Amino acid sequence: MGFLDSLFNNKKVDYKQLVKDGAVIVDVRSPQEYASGHITGSINIPLTKISTQVDALKERYPVIITCCASGNRSGMALGSLNKAGIEAYNGGSWNSLNKKINAV
């Protein structure tokens, strides 16, 4: 693990395996952004609404991967989910995450 990885607590995460194991992808972009393109099977909960959905998410999904346009909003959502005791990962941008989970 490099210096920056340890500084920002970045770990190599196998997103493809997490999805195979039942993780849900929560896209925290606006409904309009989500409608313009998203990962098949993901659910859309805008960042502004994530705090009101924490209990329902915790009850329904054991593992959550967040994504957005760039990774910033999904990082904020990650903080809220982790604070609630949910195992969650920041998948970054939805385009990048889509490539990682659909790589052959």
Image (spheres, helix red, strand yellow):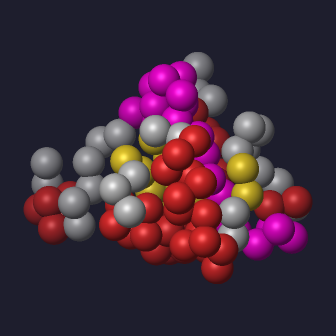
- Image quarter hosting the C terminus: top right
Q: Viewed as shown, does residue 9 lie left or right of 23?
A: left
Residue 79 visible from this viewpoint: yes
Q: Please tell me in which quadrant of the rendered image residue 45 appears.
A: bottom right
Residue 81 drawn at (x, y percent):
43, 62
Residue 23 lies within the magenta run: yes
In the image, is residue 57 above or below residue 78? Answer: above
In the image, is residue 41 above or below residue 50? Answer: above
The residue lying at 76 percent from left, 72 percent from top is 30
Residue 69 drawn at (x, y percent):
64, 67
Residue 24 drawn at (x, y percent):
59, 40
Q: Decide which of 4, 8 is in the foreground and name it.
A: 8
Residue 57 drawn at (x, y percent):
56, 52
Q: Decide which of 48, 35 is in the foreground and name it.
A: 48
Residue 97 visible from this viewpoint: no
Q: Please tell me in which quadrant of the rendered image residue 52 appears.
A: bottom right
The residue lying at 62 percent from left, 29 percent from top is 102
Marks counted in the figure total 0
Q: Decide which of 7, 77 is in the foreground and name it.
A: 77
The residue lying at 74 percent from left, 37 percent from top is 41
The residue lying at 70 percent from left, 45 percent from top is 42
Residue 57 lies within the magenta run: no
Q: Viewed as shown, does residue 100 lie left or right of 90?
A: right
Q: Which residues are magenta?
A: 14-33
In the image, is residue 12 above or below residue 46? Answer: above
Which residue is outermost to the bottom?
48
